Each structure stands twice: as C-alpha cells, then as structure tokens.
Image (spheres, rainbow, N blue to C red):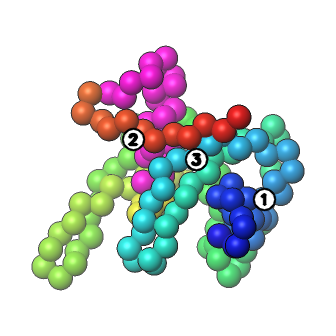
Amino acid sequence: MDDGETIERAALREAYEEIGLDGDGLRVLGRLTPLYIPVSNFALYPVLGMLSERPSLLASAHEVAHILEVALDDLLSPHSLRPGWLWRGSETITVPFFALCGERVWGATAMVLSELVQLLRLDASGTDSPEPGLSEPRWTPRP
C-alpha cells in the first residue's frame, strides 16, 4: 500500500498495474481474510469486486505470466480442488490446489479462492452458518 491508500484503493491500483483492470464501474463487495505469505514476507488483503460487463484485461509482462478466466461453475466444482504434494528435503507436504484452465492454482491464491468458494456455497445454501467443522469465514461487506 502506498501512503494514505486504503486497502480497496491499493487493490484497484494493483489490479490495474498487473492485469490492466480499469476500476471504473467496479463495485467493491468487500474484503476476504488477510493472509500473511512467509515466502515473500508480504501480507495479502484480498478485495472482492464485481463489474456489470466483462473487462478487457492485459497481463503485465513483468508481473503476470498469464490471466486465467474461470467460470464460477468450474471454481465451485468439487472436482476442481485436488490434493498435491511438495517435497522439502525428506519431508512430504500435502498442498491442495485448484485444477483450473489446465493450470494448478495453489499457495496463497488457492487459499483466497477456498474462502471465496466457501462463501459462495454458504450464500447458495441460504444459511449464515458454515458447515460443521469449518471456521466462520471472515467477510467484511462494503456498502
């Protein structure tokens, strides 16, 4: 975040810099749970927004390999979330990932998408409480 910038303003600036998203007409719906990323020593503050029209996007060659446009049905499919494994020395670590558009989406992005999926499923079920065994999602709706 730049000095004096709100989380939402920083998210819009970053989206413009990374994928050319023009924030005009974008409705900010709210924030998801902040996430600390030890590998980069950054904190991620996901902001959810919506546009009435499909935007034109252009990946920044310096920051983005390519853009994935994922249908909500694909994201919500129980077949999209899969187990993966990483090896650190002699230790095997289970790392879940989303199989989307022929790519493995994992790490911090998968964690953010998991929270979004849970929120969408809760909304679709018409209940305000999560499934048994799941923690309450942290959702900060915006007016």
- Counting from the top left corner in percent of width and height, residue 33 is at 47, 50
How many angstroms separate mark 2 from mark 3 (CA)? Answer: 26 Å
Q: Is residue 105 left or right of residue 130?
A: right
The residue identified by callout 3 is: 31
Q: What residue is rendered at 51% in x and 25% in y?
A: 123
Q: Is residue 117 above or below residue 70?
A: above
Q: What residue is rendered at 85% in x and 44% in y?
A: 25
Residue 114 falls within the magenta-colored stretch:
yes
The residue identified by callout 1 is: 21
Say which label, 2 or 3, has the lower sequence index.
3
One can see residue 111 in this view: yes
The residue identified by callout 2 is: 79
Residue lying at the far front in this picture: please name it: 4
- Counting from the top left corner in percent of width and height, residue 81 is at 38, 47
Q: Is residue 97 left or right of residue 7?
A: left
How many angstroms separate mark 1 from mark 2 (CA)? Answer: 29 Å
